[in-house]
Image: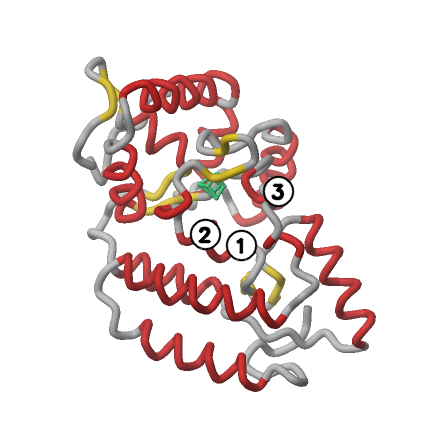
Amino acid sequence: MSADPTIPADGMEGLAATITEGYQTLRQVTCLEDVYDIMDYLMDEVKDKYSNIRCKVDCAMCCKGLHPPYVTAVEWELILYYLNEFPQIIKDEIMRRARYYAVEYRDALILQQQMIEGKIPPEEIRTTYVTLSQSLKNASCPFLVMDKCGIYPVRPAKCRAMGNSLVQINDQVKVHTCAWEISNFEEYMRERHTRALTMPVWNLFEKVVEIINPKDSMKAVLPIWLITHMGINGLAEEIDPKPKIMI
Ligand code: SF4
C-alpha cells in the first residue's frame, strides 16, 4: 500500500480527526487500561466506517496459525490477574493447553522468541516467517475457546488492533490483519480506485505500550508467558517480568 496514512481518504475526514485526537490523548496516558480504552474507541470508529471489515462478526482468524501475538510484561500482568480470578478447574485447563502448545510447537516457539528478541539476521526474516507460518498452520491461541477469546476484556494490544489498523514495516504500510482480510481490502481498494485508507497506525500503540513497561522486561508470545508462570503449585499469582525461558 503506497498511500500516506496521514492523508485522510475521501469521506474519512471525520475519522481522521478522531484518530488525531486519540493520538493526542495517547501522549498523556500512564497506564495500560487507558491505552486499551483509546484503542477500543478508535477501533470501533474504524469498524463503523469500513463496512467491508468482516472480522467484526465473531471472527477468530487472527487467533490461529502464526499467532498468538507477542505480548509485553504489563499486558501479561493484567491477563495473569484476570486468570487468577478463574475457578481452579479452568486454570487447570488453561495450563493443560499451554503444556500441549509447548510440546507440539516447541521449535516454533523458540524461533518466534528469537525473532522477538531481534536475534534473526534481517536477511533471514522472510524465510523465518515462512517457516513459522508452516510450523504453526494448525496452531491456535491457548485462550481461544470455541472460536471466542477466553480473555477478551484483557486481551493484548495487538489483538485489539488486528483488523482495524495499519502497520508500518520499513517504508511499507499495510492493513494490520490476516491474509484473508488483506485480499478483502485489496478488493475494497480496487472497487474505489484508490489505495488510500484512514486507520490508526499500530506502531504508535506498540511504542506507547513499550514505554509503560518496566525497563528490560520480557516480550514473548502468550504460551511462553503462560509456561514461565506455571509451577508445581499451579499458576503464579504475581508476574515475573523477566522469567527464565525453559521449554
Ligand atoms: S488472546 Fe484472545 S484475541 Fe488474542 S489471539 Fe488469543 S484468543 Fe485471539
Give residue 113's quadrant in the image.
top left
* Residue position for label 3: 61
* Residue at disc 1, CB closer than 8 Å to ligand 1: yes
Placement of 244 over or under 239, stated as above or below: above
Find numbered disc 3 in the image and state the secondary structure of the residue it sits on. helix
Mark-to-mark CA distance, 3 and 1: 10 Å
State the residue at coordinates (67%, 66%). Answer: 51
Q: Extreme top residue here?
A: 232
Disc ID at residue 158: 2
Q: Which of marks 3 and 2 is nearer the N terminus?
A: 3
Is residue 157 toward the left or the right of residue 215 in the image? right
State the residue at coordinates (20%, 37%). Answer: 239
* Residue position for label 1: 162
Q: Which amino acid does label 3 sit on?
A: Met
State if disc 2 and disc 1 touch (CB < 8 Å). Answer: yes
Pinpoint residue 212: horizontal percent, then vertical percent: 24, 59
